[in-house]
Image (tube, rainbow, N blue to C red):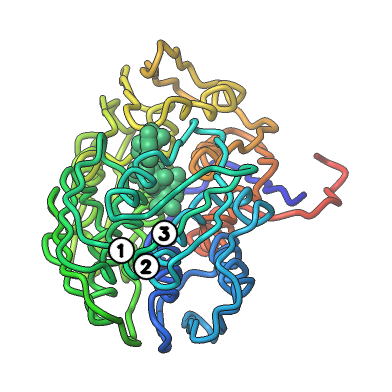
Amino acid sequence: MDQLRIRGGQRLRGRVRAAGAKNAALKMLAAGLLTRDELVLSNVPQLADISTMSRLLSAMGAKVRRHGDTVTVRSDGLTSTEASYDLVKTMRASIVVLGPLLARAGSARVSLPGGCAIGARPVDQHLKGLQALGAEIRIEHGYIVADLGQKRRLRGARIVTDLVTVTGTENLMMAATLAEGETVIENAAREPEVVDLAGCLNQMGARIRGAGTDRITVEGVESLHGAAHRVMPDRIETGSFLIAAAITGGEVVVEAAAPGTLDAVLDKLREAGADIQTGEDWIGLRMNGRPRAVDLRTAPYPAFPTDMQAQFMALGCVSEGVGTIVETIFENRFMHVLELQRLGADIRIDGNSAVVHGVEKLSGARVMATDLRASASLVIAGLVAEGETWVDRIYHLDRGYERMEQRLAQLGALIERFGAIRPSTA
Ligand code: EPZ
């Protein structure tokens, strides 16, 4: 398994380009199932999860082609509506094929995604919403088996989700595009990725209004057509680079970014003492002196994103003062704390709160990534830890960050990837 070796102490400087958003592109690939025509997606990041989704669609008979950062999906000849356990177990987001398959083909057999490192992550709201749209659903042998019974199409409905769910909203929104009549999704997720997906679907001929608010209305249509859509920049990757710059006392510009999707994160960085400048599609950060500790609480958009919690905790580890981080979205998203403590961090967990006492310095050690964002926080902490930090299990990082070590090295970090064979010094 690949590992990263980081030698801490370099200030990051320079420019880096944000890649396309993983959490937008994944759902748009699944949206390709909603039409017989070709869907052309550009600015698609090169990530393990994108490859998994492509394999999932290909296994159903869709033709998925990649040229550089452009992926085309054509699913005119679907041969199966099954998403197998072997693929779904590697990527929970596979659940978003359920809505499109039901809407387009009238049936679906999708492996029930199990829990993951950060939480139980049930899909009850997805199923509740699809049943409201007229689907008949049962769980059999670990699979969600869904069809339309005697009905020819799904039918519009008013759905109130019990909690804000991003992929739940997206699954229901996609299913509703081909339903008979109007669907209203109340308590909908407002994440920018939901808005980008709605934009892509509307380019395919869907009639979606209100994406970005907590009430989304979808007027169902008979069929959708092909389209070309550019995936939005990845705001979580962008935020991760900015925190890497801040923790090293550096000066970095992230280009091809979407500043408007990062307000809560930029506010917290300013509170920590960063000087932030923004333009239409770039964000510049300069950090003079030691960061100040801040308190933060994760919550659905537009509040502070849970996907930035671990990275911000790494910054808190070397900040001046004490900060409290409250995680309200996932019940087990502090796995990185034990590993940060191995680097000398002073963090105390109490339920879904972590109290971070900033220390003068961290010291390099061997640490292990446990999930995608935890791996980013360990890399960021390694950038300032004295000596060498070795991060194991970086396949987690590759799921959501495109060539992360090369782009950090471009900014001046001393970071290298090693396969199974490590230099004798390790
Ligand atoms: C999406 O996950 C993202 N993943 C996650 O990013 C992100 O952390 C999360 O939204 C929250 O912003 C993708 O888009 C692929 P939720 P999702 O449904 O949709 C509970 C990353 O690092 N819930 O909004 O699966 C759930 O357990 C990943 O890129 C139910 O109880 O998250 C959680 O506690 C990690 N029942 C909360 O709601 C349901 O039916 C929010 O989950 C659905 C969700």
Residue type of the residue flagged with mark 3 = Gly
For image coordinates 35% across by 87% down, the residue present is 226
Q: Secondary structure at mark 3?
A: loop
Q: CA distance from mark 1 to mark 2?
A: 6 Å
Q: Is residue 364 above or below residue 283?
A: above
Q: Position of residue 283 (x, y in %)?
A: 26, 60
- Disc 2 element: helix
Q: Amino acid at mark 2?
A: Ala
User: Mark 1 against mark 3, which lies toward the viewer?
Assistant: 3
Q: In the rendered view, would you say 329 is above or below 140?
A: above
Residue 264 in picture, x, y percent from top left: 21, 43
Label 1 CA crowd tier, 10 Å (few <14, some 14–19, many 20+): many
Say which residue appears at 22% left-offset and 56% top-offset. 261
SS of the residue under disc 1? loop
Q: Which residue is labeled 1 in the image?
A: 154
Q: Nearer the viewer, residue 118 or 298?
A: 118
Q: Is residue 93 above or below residue 47?
A: above
Mark 1 and ligand 1: say if the CB distance to the nearest ligand atom is below 8 Å: no
Q: Closest to the observer: 417 or 303? A: 303
- State the separation of the CA atoms marked 2 and 3: 13 Å
Marks 1 & 2, CB-CB < 8 Å contact: yes
Report the residue marked by disc 2: 103
In this rendering, the label closer to the viewer, 2 or 3: 3
